[in-house]
Amino acid sequence: MGHSRVKTKQAKKRRRNKIIIVIALALVTVVGCAGAYWHFRIGNYEGVLGGKISFPEANAAHEQQILDVRDAFSKDIINIVLFGFDRNLARDEVYATYRADTIMLASINLKDGTAAVVSIPRDTLVPIYKRGGGRDKINSAYYYGWRYGGGKTDEEKYEKGMLYQVETVSMALKGVPIHYYVSVDMESVKSIVDAIGGVEYDVPKNIYSKSGRLLLEKGKKVLNGAQLLIFVRDRQYSMGDIKRVENQQDIMMELFKQLKSTGNLLRIPKIYAAVADNVKTNLTMEQIMSLAHYGMNTLDAEKISTYVMPTSFKWGRLSESWTKSYSYLIINQKARAKMLYDIWGLEVKPDKTDVIFDPLPEEEFTEESDEDPEDPEEPEDPEDPDQT
């Protein structure tokens, strides 16, 4: 089954814009709706957050390993996955076209006051939840849940899509449980950044358009919403998306430090109003308020560690029968195992390295080869295409 591809500049531009949404997510989940609940109640972090943890169902193919890993966790550790989806008014009519362009897991240790942020690049090749071991890019998991998850209504299909996306991320982390999720879209980027008065940041290099026009000058400055978008969507690095993910993490840390140091609570209602209609989460309002209290009073930037799923780039085919190659990021299995140990103290056995087939001799790598297909009718799933 082939991919359909939309190559318009407008479509590409839409998709790049929303990567900043997850960066701005801290403004919603950490400091959103301040003042709506009692101060003494939201200070009870373990009671509010820890008391409502429920583990999602495990994938049968990995059930024993996942359950073993989850036994190592307690209510002192809260894992929240953050998704930036390519939603807009046109795509609201067809949930299936959504793809998670930004994936970050925030792991908060309530006992020792530390946190870890793990970013997983969108092109990372992983087994998809409930696809019998079938592999695809991690950002395609939502589609599989929407189409094959058994939902009847659009809302049910959306919920199944989110389940597949969340569980696929958990599987990519060898069964680390995900307790909560937050998904946001691209609509409110500029207004979020502008509402807090911009973000002071030292831009490391000049950023140019493809035609050579200077878009953003290097140096320390206060970035407005439009300028911040230019910075975080820039891919003119030898490491491509990996460097872009690192830039997202870096500017997220600057956002956190600046919000914390300024106590920017007076602007929070305006910020929240800008994004409230574009956020879906299973966190309650009280839990959001508890996170706000925790972030402002307990969590310091120096106690937040950042990680990126260790991968290497490969352009090729998942099956010899394919006639077209795509870009994938192949997980470094030993490095992933070390990352899991460093963050959570988990000891897991490295899997075998994923293998994909070389491109056909007549294929030529172009810039479009590094893009996801837009509005796919179905992602290719050669290993188990008919499983539902």
Image (tube, rainbow, N blue to C red):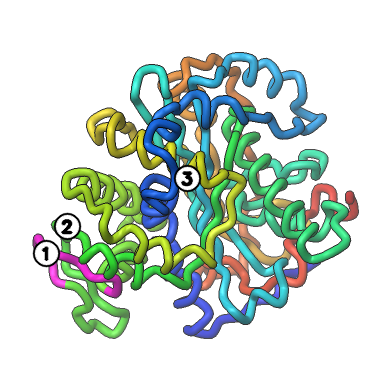
Disc 3 residue crowd, few under 14, some 14–19, many 20+, Cα 10 Å: many
Disc 2 residue crowd, few under 14, some 14–19, many 20+, Cα 10 Å: some
Badges 2 and 1: C-beta atoms under 8 Å apart?
A: yes
Residue 222: in magenta span:
yes
At 69% from the left and 24% from the top, the residue drawn is 66
Based on the displayed image, in which of its 4 quarters is residue 45 positioned?
top left
Residue 224 visible to an observer of this rendering = yes
- Tell which circle, 2 or 1, labels the residue nearer the N-terminal end: 2
- The answer to whether residue 171 is above or below residue 150 is above
Based on the displayed image, in which of its 4 quarters is residue 209 positioned?
bottom left
Foreground: 38 or 8?
A: 38
| Disc 2 target residue | 201
- The answer to whether residue 341 is above or below residue 321 is above
- For label 2, the SS is strand
Q: Look at label 2 and name its amino acid.
A: Tyr
Q: Gap between marks 3 and 2, in whole Å?
A: 21 Å
At 84% from the left and 55% from the top, the residue drawn is 148
- Tell which circle, 3 or 1, labels the residue nearer the N-terminal end: 3
Name the mark on residue 104.
3
Residue numbers of the magenta segment: 217-226
Residue 22's spot in the image, x, y percent? Answer: 43, 55
**As drawn, is 220 to the left or to the right of 235?**
left
Q: Look at label 1 and name its amino acid.
A: Lys
- For label 1, the SS is strand
**As drawn, is 364 to the left or to the right of 57?**
left
**As drawn, is 326 to the left or to the right of 276?**
right
Residue 301: in magenta span:
no
| Disc 1 target residue | 221
- Quarter of the picture containing the N terminus is bottom right
- The answer to whether residue 89 is above or below residue 142 is below
At 33% from the left and 62% from the top, the residue drawn is 232
- Tell which circle, 3 or 2, labels the residue nearer the N-terminal end: 3
